[in-house]
Amino acid sequence: MAIKVRIPTPLQKLTDKKAEVKCSGKTVIELIAILDKKYPGIKERLCDEKGNIRRFINIFVNEQDIRFLKGKNSKLKDGDDVSIIPAIAGG
Amino acid sequence: MSFAKSLKCRECGRIYEKKPIYVCEYCFGPLEVVYDYKKIKKVLTKERIIARKENLWRYKELLPVDHEPTVGLNSGFTPLFEAKNLSKKLNCKKIFIKDDSVNHPTLSFKDRVVAVALSKAKEFGFKTVACASTGNLANSVSSHSKSAGFNCYVFIPADLEKSKIISSLIYGVNLVAIEGNYDDVNRLCGEIASKYKWAFVNINLRPYYAEGSKTYGFEIIEQLGWRAPQNIIIPAASGSLLTKVYKGIKEFEQIGLIKKSNTKFHIAQASGCSPIVTAFKKKSEIIKPIKPNTIAKSLAIGNPADGFYAIDIIRKTNGYGEVATNDEIVEGIKLLAETEGIFTETAGGVVVAVCKKLVEQRKIKRNEEIVISITGNGLKTQEAVEGKTSKLIKIKPNIQSFEKIL
């Protein structure tokens, strides 16, 4: 089993147009580093120069916003679902 | 003829073509419409605006449509008036109310943004429109989608006020209630929007949609006699309305319709959902998302997308932010009803309560003019005040019975 990652449209150019990819990693930030090896350039899009997740990106682990968990150091395990979603306006 | 040139990332400045896209491919910053102000300055004069019909399209050069607008032709141009009784009650010199609780056709400021978003959806050739909503947007998209001839999917949190649910269902749209809060609805809609090629008004049409809010500010300026107010108090969910009213004022300055202004922007949130005010008060660079718990459901967004920009504007205009508890919201609704005869929804109660607080705390001086933003109608959130109003008087059908209760 692996971790399922849903890729938002703006990043699908980097993932050969795939909307969902499989990956691994013990934490969110580690997962991003491993994703970047498979799909070079993806980390730069998701993280700023300091390695923090950009402020307009929301990352969810099993539907839970990682800012309610441990941010970029939130733990991951096999079978988890990760969604990367840009911020959305009000309604 | 279009005066909107392109889309631009608010974070890194990259330029994009006008398409149904909403985030920068590089840094995920939100995209915003940029205009050719030199060209607009040549054609958009006060005289030309005044000669046009009284709806939000009288400022169409500053809205992102490429052709004549097709949706929301009766929306906007709601009343602005001096609230003398409320001013007296709060011991203030002059409070104005900008009253979108009577906006056409669905009684909230969302009729503005939807007019622009669906006119744009037509231009892009979409057949289906959709939105993620806390209620007011749902009503407006539902209504306008029918008059404009779109298929329509509307997504809401399951615990919305009954009236907001019925006021969407009546139009015969596909209303989908999601077990979760608005932020859950947003997350799911983000995923649906990338899979289905629909016009999600506040997702892939967001850059165009949000521009509609500027007209709330344009109208205030025009109705005040072509000047910006000293203070404005705006309720915030995502923070988008505040940032766009500010943009609107700056645009009017840029094209020379008004002199340089120094309006102070104040933000109002419910204490059960105040991520923006909390970050502002803590002087924090991070807006920590929260799980909303408030009767002001139209403001219950725990993860506000435009919060950073809203805080930036409050700081640079020397404004403040304040919050209202559930009880204070109800008191605010009642105060506005009892002084000005206006029944606003919970978001309006938040604004009235925050106005009272900011004046009491001397954050706004009593001798300064204040515009308060009433953005929605109380008929949609009656549950919030049920049992908290004066009591119904029941009598027998005779004069003695009546005189007993006098």
Image: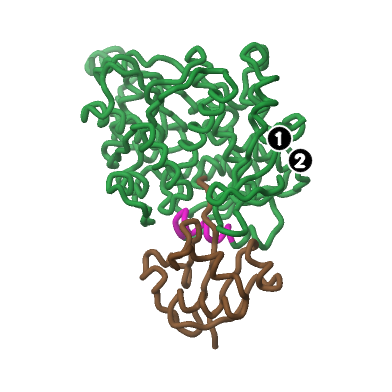
Q: Is residue B12 visible?
A: yes
Here the colouring is by chain
User: In the rendered image, which residue does mark 2 sit on?
Assistant: B123
Do the residues under discs 2 and 1 have CB atoms within 8 angstroms?
A: yes
- The quadrant holding residue B59 is top right
Residue at (34, 47) in percent of width and height: B274
Residue visible at 38% across and 35% down in the picture: B316
Locate residue B20, reporting x and y percent.
Answer: 69, 49
Q: Give the colour of chain B.
A: green
Dot 2, crowdedness within 10 Å: few (<14), some or many (≥20)? some
- Magenta range is B180-190
> From mark 2 to mark 1, how far is it between C-alphas?
8 Å
* Marked residue chain, label 2: B
Q: Which chain is brown?
A: A
Q: From the viewer's perspective, tell me whether residue B197 is left or right of residue B108.
A: right
Q: Residue at x 35, y 41 (%)?
A: B269
